[in-house]
Structure formats: C-alpha cells, structure tokens
C-alpha cells in the first residue's frame, strides 16, 4: 500500500511540474496532477495485489501453449 502511495505521489508531482513547465494554470496543473496521481496509485495497488495471479496465469499460458493442435484442420467445402 505504501509503495502504491509513493508511486502516486511521484507521478502527481511529475505531472504538476510538467504542466507548469508548459504554462498551464494552477488549477489545470493541480487537476491533471490529482487525476494522474490517483489513477497511477490505483494501478500500482492492483498490480501489487494481483501479481501472484498474473504470475500463475503467465506460467499456465506458457505451459499450455505447447499442447494440442495449433489450428483447425481443413473443412469440407
């Protein structure tokens, strides 16, 4: 949870600095920073919570892709 918060704060700060560098108003820069900070924190939290499922899914995919036919055979016209 703390890592996701740090990622969100870092992204928000970088977005705010980038927006101010391009002469955005304070409100627009703060809004963009808040939106990107919250969304990146949410994505980071989801990735940290569900990484075992993603890892197992990837291993299962690599294991199963070698078995069975790759395509359907020719059909009757």
Image: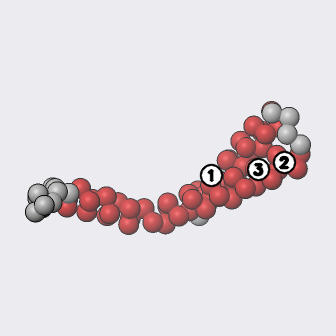
Q: Position of residue 64 (x, y in %)?
A: 19, 61
User: Compared to 49, does 11 lie above or below?
Assistant: above
Q: Residue at x 62, y 55 (%)?
A: 40
Q: Which residue is mark 3?
A: 32
User: Marks 3/1: CA distance?
Assistant: 15 Å
User: Marks 2/3: CA distance?
Assistant: 6 Å
For the question of whether residue 67 can be seen, the reply is no
Q: Residues within 10 Å of mark 1 (few under 14, many from 20)?
A: many
Q: Residues within 10 Å of mark 3 (few under 14, many from 20)?
A: some
Label 1 sits on a secondary structure element that is: helix
N-terminal-most mark, 1 or 2:
1
User: Compared to 11, does 23 lie above or below?
Assistant: above
Q: Residue at x 17, y 57 (%)?
A: 71
Picture quarter with the N terminus: bottom right
Q: Which residue is mark 2?
A: 28
Residue 5 falls in image quadrant: bottom right
- The residue mark sitting in front, 1 or 2, is 2
Q: Position of residue 25 (x, y in %)?
A: 89, 43
For the question of whether residue 43 can be seen, the reply is yes
Where residue 7 is drawn, which disc sits there? 1
N-terminal-most mark, 3 or 1:
1
Q: Are marks 2 and 3 in contact (CB under 8 Å)?
A: yes
């Amino acid at each position: 949870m703390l890592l996701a918060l740090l990622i969100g704060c870092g992204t928000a700060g970088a977005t705010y600095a980038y927006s101010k560098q391009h002469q955005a108003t304070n409100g627009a820069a703060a809004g963009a920073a808040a939106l990107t900070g919250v969304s990146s924190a949410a994505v980071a939290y989801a990735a940290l919570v569900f990484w075992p499922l993603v890892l197992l899914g990837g291993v299962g995919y690599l294991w199963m892709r070698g078995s069975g036919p790759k395509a359907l055979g020719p059909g009757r016209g």
